[in-house]
Amino acid sequence: MQPNFGSDIWATLFEPLDETTQAIITADINKIVNYDPRLAITEINVTKQNNGFLIQMNISYVPTDETATILLNFDRNSQTLTTGASNPITGALIG
């Protein structure tokens, strides 16, 4: 088991989405994506939603320079995460 692997984003779900919380979320995403040297984040946007927040990130698959936009919608009421992607990188992020 690797106690330092995973995300701290769930811990921020009930915090106000201010600059500090956005910085924590962005740093956490960068930490996770940087585990795979084939991936590079080109943009991360965190926006408030009615019951949580939405993370939109643009990721590039470095060997082929393919890009994808990944959407992560965290809902505090149902405590669920829904995902979506446009232009998914074949095999790199979505199996």
Image (cartoon, helix red, strand yellow):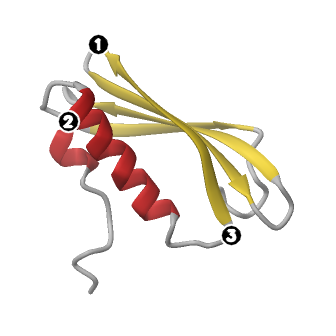
Asked if residue 24 is positioned above or below residue 73 in the image, the reply reads below
- Quadrant in which residue 84 is drawn: top right
What is the C-alpha distance between the residues marked 2 and 3?
Answer: 29 Å
Q: Position of residue 16 (x, y in %)?
A: 15, 24
For label 3, the residue is 38
For marks 2 and 1, the one nearer the N-term is 2
> What is the number of the mark on residue 50?
1
Q: Position of residue 21 (x, y in %)?
A: 23, 36
At a point 34% along the width and 17% down the height, the residue shown is 49
Q: Position of residue 82 (x, y in %)?
A: 44, 37
From the viewer's perspective, tell me whether residue 62 is left or right of residue 49.
Answer: right
What is the C-alpha distance between the residues marked 2 and 1?
Answer: 12 Å
The quadrant in which the C terminus is found is: bottom right
What is the C-alpha distance between the residues marked 3 and 1?
Answer: 34 Å
For label 2, the residue is 13
- Quadrant in which residue 78 is drawn: top left
From the viewer's perspective, tell me whether residue 67 is left or right of residue 18.
Answer: right
The quadrant in which the N terminus is found is: bottom left
- Quadrant in which residue 79 is drawn: top left
